[in-house]
Image: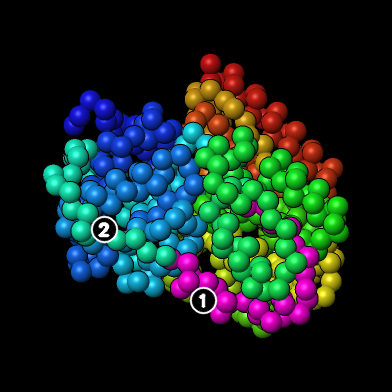
Amino acid sequence: MSASSNSSKIKFGTDGWRGIIADDFTFPNVRKVTRAIASYLETAYSKDRPVLIAYDTRFLADQFARTAAQVLADLGWTVKITDRDCPTPVIAYNARHLNSAGALMFTASHNPAPYCGIKYIPDYAGPATPEITDTIVANIESASDELPSNNPSGAISTFDPKPDYLQFIYTLLDVEKIRSAQLKVKYDALYSTSRGYLDEVLQHSGAQLESFHTWRDVLFGGGMPEPKGEQLVELVEAVLRDRADLGLATDGDSDRFGIVDEQGNVLTPNTVLLVLARHLIKNKGKSGAIVRTVATTHLLDNLAAKYGLPIYETAVGFKYIGEKMRETSVLIGGEESGGLSVIGHIPEKDGVLADMLVAEAIAYEGKPLSQLVKEAIAEADGPLYNTRLDLHLTEAHKTAVIDSFTKNPPTEVAGIKVKEVGRKDGIKLYLEEGSWILLRPSGTEPLVRVYLETNSPEKLTQVAQEMESSIAKLEVVAV
């Protein structure tokens, strides 16, 4: 191993390996991880199937992608690399469509500009399962970071993944219905890979469109490529100024969505999931299971019960939702962090499709988006109120908290009885009255995330205060 490579810094999270460019995310480490992935490919695919490679808009992402292509070609694989930066759902779709040996995607998703990442997407077009990523991680230690032995550029070609993806997306949307609504839409690309995709679909669907930040900026305008309120100020202003029907955005690799209603409200992913689940059932006559992570709103459970649909709860990470989508018929699967997929689509989250489905819901109903939100919440016996506490603790304190809640979970919190304790991912307290609390320790930093949902703002405040107080008391134990 060369001095410039350090495999101990390569840690795979829920969705691949991310690191800081020029610190741990270096060309030698990219070569090393690519060879680790190639070792897995040797066990799963024959070399007559191409390996696809794509990348987002980050600094050097295109060069890291080219480096991986050279390593794979040197190992005897045929490589097809995208002709420009590309959304994750687009390369995932092509991984299946082109009968590939899977795809490497260079992205750090919604992380800040100094980060880059790499993830492997198998040929089924969804996130790699833990079995696959565990195998890749096990291969890293013995993988070389050396330069390829020759220059096998003949085995590398570029391709445009867009036409086939768009053709497929149009089969999932009622384009004529959206055209008939003549929606006024504002779109903030946030310098992401969705530019040239989402705006093209909107124009094809007859939207009166104004777009922002539709060029590559490796610093993301000094912000984050994350479609949350603080990054969408300009979009909200544009929606309100021109009385648009909605505002749309995506994160850096376009697998997460951002939605602004006509009143300038940035909708939470929980709300969008609810609105779209109802739209698929009510307007499009679709059926199937609703799948959500442990951290996602239980309003989806209420809606599923109303329509007699199965509901599945998974661990955090879209790979678990994707796995369920490959096992059974899933109407909609999603997570509170902003990813979803729907029946008929690939088992991977897709911000472009999610945004367009919201436009489609407005077109079907002929009502403002804020009205659709109210109706969906009422139909699901809402509202429920939720929040997340990010508690920065010492490692000792974090361990003490998880230990205490695992061995001696409370029987009530803020006067609400605990009915059940779940351990699918972290510790989840299922309370009476539809309330719940989830404690999830971070695997990479001294942080415990506490997710809360209950049926009144007052209770939410009380539960949050009691949880913070209980956790603070455990610091004495940790000393």
The secondary structure that most of the magenta stretch takes on is helix
Q: Is residue 152 left or right of residue 279?
A: left
Asked whether, in this view, residue 439 is left or right of residue 60, the answer is right
Query: Where residue 303 sits in the image (x, y, percent)?
Result: 71, 69
Give the residue at mark 1. 167
Q: Residue at x 80, y 55 (%)?
A: 239
* Residue 17 higher or lower than 189, as above or below: above
Q: Magenta residues?
A: 161-189
C-beta proximity under 8 Å, tags 1 and 2: no
Please say whether residue 191 is one of the residues in the magenta stretch: no
Mark before the other along the chain sequence, 1 or 2: 2
Image position of 124 with respect to 141: above or below: below
Q: Against 226, is 361 above or below?
A: below
Image location (x, y in percent) of residue 335: 59, 56
- Whole-percent x and y of residue 347? 48, 66
Q: Amino acid at mark 1?
A: Gln
- Viewer can see residue 190: yes
How does the figure colour the protein chain or chains? rainbow
Q: Position of residue 158 (x, y in %)?
A: 34, 60
Q: Name the residue nearer the viewer: 312 or 273.
A: 273
Q: Quadrant of residue 323?
A: bottom left
| Element at label 2 | strand
The residue depicted at 18 percent of the width and 31 percent of the height is 1
Q: At x 46% / y 53%, what residue is drawn?
A: 85
Q: Which mark is residue 156?
A: 2
- Answer whether residue 186 is magenta in the image: yes
